[in-house]
Amino acid sequence: MSTKTGVYPCYENQFQINTGTSGSSETMKNIADCESFSVSFDNGVEEWTPFDTEGWVRRLMTAKSVTISVKGKRNVGDAGNDAVAALAWLNGRNVEKDFQWTFPDGTTVKLASAIINVTNVGAGDSTGVAPLEFDVMSNGKPTVTPAV
């Protein structure tokens, strides 16, 4: 059981990405300068209406996916930030990276071979700090490890 209880500020969530090259051992690094994030679940629900329910619908959730949308600043030289930014120019299986979300209580959600969809790398106002924005899309079932 985690020793951390109660409410917490969002900044206590942290994100890590595998900075190793394909075929190398896993090297998870924090991604610097993440400012905000949102999480959306896409749930596939099958519906049917059998005779014995007298018109009431039955349902079963048969599919799930998760997308984590992150907004931050481009920090050249930070291993995690650089690993995300480098994916902007790649396609196909080359944008798959292991990604991990660490909750304040120590629980981790690991998305193996997640699709990292970089949506902005450096574009903005001339007086603004260069952004790094990306979506992390699940690619199979995540591994959730509760805090101990």
Image: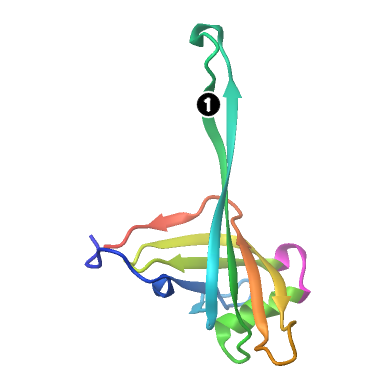
In the drawing, does residue 52 fall left or right of residue 123? Answer: left
x, y percentage for residue 51?
55, 7
Q: Identify the residue at horizontal 71%, vertical 75% (top origin).
A: 120
Which quarter of the figure has residue 7? bottom left
Which quarter of the figure has residue 122? bottom right
- Which residue range is magenta in the image? 89-94
User: Is residue 22 within the magenta segment?
Assistant: no
In the drawing, does residue 26 fall left or right of residue 77? Answer: left
x, y percentage for residue 124?
73, 83
x, y percentage for residue 21?
63, 77
Give the SS element for disc 1.
strand
- The residue under label 1 is 59
In the drawing, does residue 89 fall left or right of residue 105? Answer: right
Q: Is residue 133 above or below residue 33?
A: above
In the drawing, does residue 22 fall left or right of residue 142? Answer: right
Front-lying residue, 43 or 79: 43
